[in-house]
Image: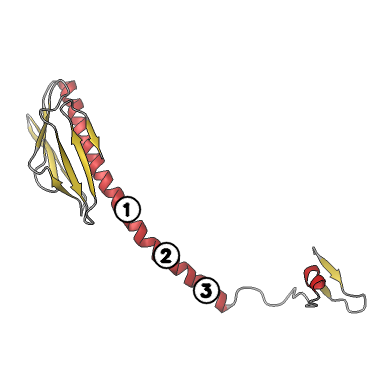
Amino acid sequence: MPHEIRAGAQSGSRWHVRCYSLGEFKQMNRHGDRGFSLIELAITVLVMGLVLSFGIPAFRSLSNSYQLHGAAENMASQLRLAREKAISTGVEQPMHFVTSTTYHIHYPTGIATVWTLPKGITISSGVGSWFRMERDGRSDNSGIVVLRDARGNLDTVSVQLSGLVITR
């Protein structure tokens, strides 16, 4: 065993070097009680409870923030895809923001897919607006669509006349 000193040949007991040098002659307990006391376990559970109680609300807030940003990025991706389709097929791609939670693209054959925003996220500005991506990649008008989550955080999708779609 490291750092042990024989106390004497006749006693046969072992002493810890630190205790021996400090003048504390406490015998090491080699085979006695092992494990944690009830108080140590209670303190550990209390500390873990405090960490979790502060961590879970912060995690929820972070999750909601990512959900809002993800919805804005998804909307911007659909607008970019509409632009690319208009360029590649030579057919205009009009996107319509119908309600505060849905939007879709009008194809010549009709509406193929209606996209719905995640729960708690709404379009707060831009409902009823249209952005038509022309065959040359430009948009027929410019504007922004503002998304809002339940806590009031905002994220915007901006469409420029050049067809460039930006999220902020």
Q: Position of residue 35 (x, y in %)?
A: 62, 73
10 Å crowding of disc 1: few (<14), some (14-19), many (20+): few
Measured in 3D between alpha carbons, the distance from the residue under mark 2 to the one under mark 1, in whole angstroms, is: 16 Å
Q: Position of residue 42 (x, y in %)?
A: 51, 75
Q: Of the numbered discs in the image, which one, if any, rests on residue 52?
A: 2
Q: Are marks 2 and 3 in contact (CB under 8 Å)?
A: no
Compared to 78, does 121 lie above or below?
Answer: below
Q: Residue furthest right?
A: 9
Q: Is any part of residue 30 visible from this angle? A: yes
Left/right of residue 50 with respect to residue 125 in the rendered view: right
Q: Of the numbered discs in the image, which one, if any, rests on residue 63?
A: 1
Identify which amino acid the numbered label 1 is placed on.
Answer: Ser
Determine which residue is flagged by label 3.
43
For residue 76, which quarter of the picture? top left
10 Å crowding of disc 2: few (<14), some (14-19), many (20+): few
Identify which amino acid the numbered label 3 is placed on.
Answer: Ile
Q: Earlier in the sequence, mark 3 or mark 1?
A: 3
